């Protein structure tokens, strides 16, 4: 190929890499993105395409090279250029005062000392080595002298720059910091693991460590890990660096490394203790776990004069927050019924203070989790406040299990309404089948029923539903259709006009469609797409209500899990009664023309399962569904291992994330059109 083409490609590649690095920095370090995710993806895709066309132009520090390569056999070991020290701990104010006194005495100073105070993240310590501004090695702390080489994994963190920005960095620079998993990422990750039936991580720190020490860097790349730099290692002796720790952190930030924004320069021991308490007050609101704060003498020359004792510096100390684990007894295990009918075991504990908060109820999440931890009534358990907010049972103290300890049994009937509890084969979650009549689910069911994509009752929002349910005026959706305007007008914040508007909106909703009505019922596993498919297959409600599991499984995209939920829903007398009352109140829909087959057979997409998410430019969801079905494919509402393609438009959400987690091919609007156009 001509040199001019290569030069043009190189110029465009350079521009794209610089732009992507800039946007990574804005997003991960400054927390101030300048472009949308879609625009960012477009830059990345263009760079990938150019690098695919010009493989000789690919470099190890290109942003495309973050996602790990093939699994490595094992981690090699790394000898740190300078040992990674640990910190002495203080638990009481008095110990901090003694530390400050020692510092002043050793330095021969009478006055106050300037410190840098920092949150102490509860994550995993790492060391990153930059040579000539390029990341060449990343390692865990290990025993402080030798760590594991996790370079490929650390490279996958978007907040780890592969090249330093700016100028003035030493030729060799070792940066120390903490890798952590933000709470939101931890929750999403455990939700994904739960959906995939895999073991959950107990807390963000374990999850971060487990994610960073994956042998396959592609797994690390899917985990939303972050990190903060907090110190320099080798290279820190350079005379050109700022003379204080605080300014050095600012320099690190200037070179593109993320530094915790809560670090402060404070003067004197009282200010240290004040910082400790301020961080403690903010702790529950932070998006990451901290287990204390760290105080460091700010002046680097003073640090050098103070030196080290054994493996800890004399110029720094960690001031830890009280232990967040406590031991207590399981008095009982009850079952809560959530908004979607999920029946969740909850351990009732002898009240215990964990990190300063009294804990007496702890969710055990689901029955599998309860079995895995083998929690029994009467057991002694270790309780922890994960992420400082949600308490959890860490483990049972088996040695203290009394002879009278009782196993927990999943109730056959809902504790709130008495309806049958269903737990289909292979499902983790057990659910109450009472649905519309279960008081625990009533509020959410009503909200769902009234939603825009369901019965579309304008003006019926959360506050109003709360008032109607709390006032005993509405027990199930059928009650909505008999509400007199005067009764509504008497509710808080309602007047005659709002009441009349609401009555009119309820009235309008009587004329609906079968798919909307089916979706509005809130049958577990029946989203909009499945509701449409069921309507097309059965044509009307009665044949659907009469269908057994075998008949339901003849419908495209209905498997054993969905069919079991549908049968259980319609078998529940309360649900049948509510449906009858809705129809008696005038809720109606036109019959749906039943196609000879509800999908084209033998089409090019025969047997392929699609999930649509986000907004597809120039194509409504209905049109996209019709295009797929006319080629023999099916559309479902949720992503599972059986999904063949996820079509993701703008503002795609959790379905896209799940698709990526399950390695399911994702099509953008252009790729989707290309697939439809294929013969
Ligand atoms: N914020 C912060 N955490 N942390 C942990 N600074 C900090 N410094 C540490 C450690 C182990 O060690 C210093 C001696 C560099």
Image (cartoon, rainbow, N blue to C red):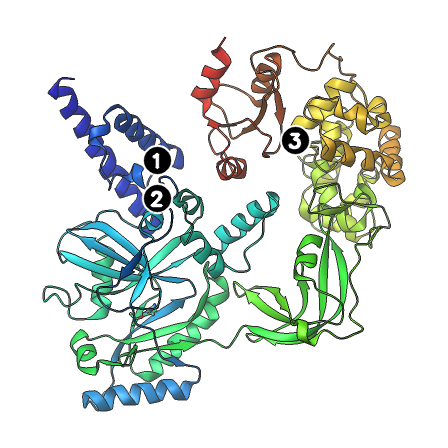
Q: Is residue 455 left or right of residue 295?
A: right
Figure quarter occupied by ligand 1: bottom left
The CA span between labels 2 and 3 is 32 Å
Q: Nearer the viewer, mark 3 or mark 1?
A: 1
Q: Are marks 1 and 2 in contact (CB under 8 Å)?
A: yes
Q: Is residue 149 above or below residue 248?
A: above
Residue 318, placed above or below residue 63:
below
Residue, disc 2: 33
| Residue at 60%, 47% in the rendered image | 194
| Residue assigned mark 1 | 40
Give the answer, above or below, for where 313 lies relative to 588.
below
Q: Position of residue 139 (x, y in %)?
A: 31, 57
Name the residue rendered at 20%, 31% in the picture: 57
Q: Quick one: quadrant of the N terminus?
A: top left
The single residue placed furthest to the front in the displayed view is: 73
For the residues bearing labels 3 and 1, Cβ distance under 8 angstroms: no
Q: Quadrant of residue 68?
A: top left
Disc 2, ligand 1: is the CB inside 8 Å? no
Task: Name the secondary structure under disc 2.
Answer: loop
Q: Compared with residue 11, is residue 123 higher up or lower down, i.e. above or below?
A: below
Left or right: 490 in relation to 608 = right
Tag shown at residue 453: 3
- Earlier in the chain: of badge 1 and badge 2, it is 2
Residue 447 position in % (x across, y down): 70, 41
Disc with the residue nearer the chain's start (2 vs 3)? 2
Real-space Cα distance between discs 3 and 1?
31 Å
In the image as oriented, which residue stretches furthest toward the left?
A: 239
* Residue 181 seen in the current view: no
- Point out residue 319 in the picture as x, y percentages from the top left corner: 40, 78
Whether residue 441 sits left or right of residue 210 in the image: it is right
- In x, y percent, where is residue 219? 44, 44
């Amino acid at each position: 190929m001509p040199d001019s083409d290569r030069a043009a490609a190189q110029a465009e590649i350079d521009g794209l890499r610089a732009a992507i690095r800039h946007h990574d920095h804005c997003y991960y370090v400054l927390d101030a993105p300048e472009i949308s995710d879609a625009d960012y993806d477009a830059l990345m895709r263009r760079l990938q395409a150019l690098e695919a066309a010009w493989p000789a132009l690919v470099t190890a520090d290109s942003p495309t090279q973050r996602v790990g390569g093939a699994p490595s056999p094992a981690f090699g070991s790394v000898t740190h250029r300078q040992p990674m020290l640990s910190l002495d701990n203080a638990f009481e104010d008095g110990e901090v005062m003694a530390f400050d006194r020692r510092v002043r005495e050793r330095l021969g100073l009478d006055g106050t000392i300037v410190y840098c105070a920092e949150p102490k993240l509860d994550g995993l310590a790492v060391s990153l080595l930059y040579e000539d501004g390029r990341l060449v090695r990343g390692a865990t702390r290990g025993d402080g002298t030798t760590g594991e080489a996790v370079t490929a994994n650390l490279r996958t963190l978007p907040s780890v720059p592969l090249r330093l920005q700016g100028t003035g960095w030493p030729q060799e620079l070792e940066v120390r910091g903490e890798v952590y998993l933000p709470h939101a990422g931890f929750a999403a990750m455990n939700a994904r693991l739960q959906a995939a039936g895999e073991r959950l991580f107990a807390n963000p720190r374990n999850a971060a460590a487990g994610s960073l020490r994956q042998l396959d860097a592609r797994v690390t790349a899917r985990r939303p890990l972050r990190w903060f730099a907090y110190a320099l290692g080798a290279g820190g002796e350079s005379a050109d660096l700022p003379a204080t720790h605080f300014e050095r952190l600012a320099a690190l930030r200037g070179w593109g490394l993320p530094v915790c924004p809560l670090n402060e320069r404070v003067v004197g021991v009282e200010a240290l203790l004040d910082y400790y308490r301020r961080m403690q007050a903010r702790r529950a609101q932070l998006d990451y776990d901290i287990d204390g704060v760290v105080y460091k003498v700010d002046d680097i020359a003073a640090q050098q004069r103070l030196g080290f004792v054994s493996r800890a510096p004399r110029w720094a100390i960690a001031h830890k927050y009280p232990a967040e684990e406590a031991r207590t007894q399981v008095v009982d295990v009850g079952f809560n019924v959530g908004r979607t009918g999920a029946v969740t075991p909850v351990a009732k504990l002898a009240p215990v203070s964990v990190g300063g908060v009294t804990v007496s109820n702890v969710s055990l999440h689901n029955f599998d989790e309860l079995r895995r931890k083998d929690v029994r009534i009467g057991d002694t358990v270790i309780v922890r406040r994960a992420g400082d907010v949600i308490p959890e049972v860490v483990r049972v103290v088996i040695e203290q299990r009394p002879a009278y300890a009782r196993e927990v049994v999943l109730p056959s009937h809902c504790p709130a309404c008495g309806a049958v509890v269903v737990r289909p084969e292979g499902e983790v979650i057990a659910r109450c089948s009472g649905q519309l009549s279960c008081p625990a689910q009533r509020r959410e069911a009503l909200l769902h029923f009234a939603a825009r994509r369901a019965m579309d009752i304008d003006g019926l929002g959360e506050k109003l539903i709360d008032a109607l349910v709390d006032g005993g005026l509405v027990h199930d959706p059928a009650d909505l259709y008999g509400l007199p305007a005067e009764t509504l007008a008497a509710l808080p914040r309602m007047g005659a006009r709002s009441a009349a508007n609401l009555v009119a909106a309820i009235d309008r909703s009587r004329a609906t469609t079968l798919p909307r009505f089916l979706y509005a019922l809130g049958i577990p596993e029946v989203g909009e797409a499945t509701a449409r498919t069921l309507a097309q297959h059965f044509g009307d409600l009665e044949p659907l209500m009469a269908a057994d599991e075998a008949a339901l499984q003849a419908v495209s995209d209905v498997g054993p899990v969905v069919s079991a939920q549908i049968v259980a829903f319609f078998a529940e007398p309360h649900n049948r009664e509510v449906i009858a009352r809705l129809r008696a109140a005038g809720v109606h829909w036109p019959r749906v023309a039943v196609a000879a087959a509800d999908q084209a057979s033998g089409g090019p997409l025969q047997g392929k399962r699609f999930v649509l998410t986000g907004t597809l430019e120039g194509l409504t969801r209905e049109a996209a569904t019709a295009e797929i079905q006319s080629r023999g494919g099916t559309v479902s509402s949720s992503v599972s291992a059986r999904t063949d393609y996820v079509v993701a438009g703008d503002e795609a959400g959790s379905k896209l994330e799940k698709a990526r987690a399950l390695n399911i091919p994702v099509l953008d609007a252009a790729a989707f059109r290309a697939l439809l156009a294929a013969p």
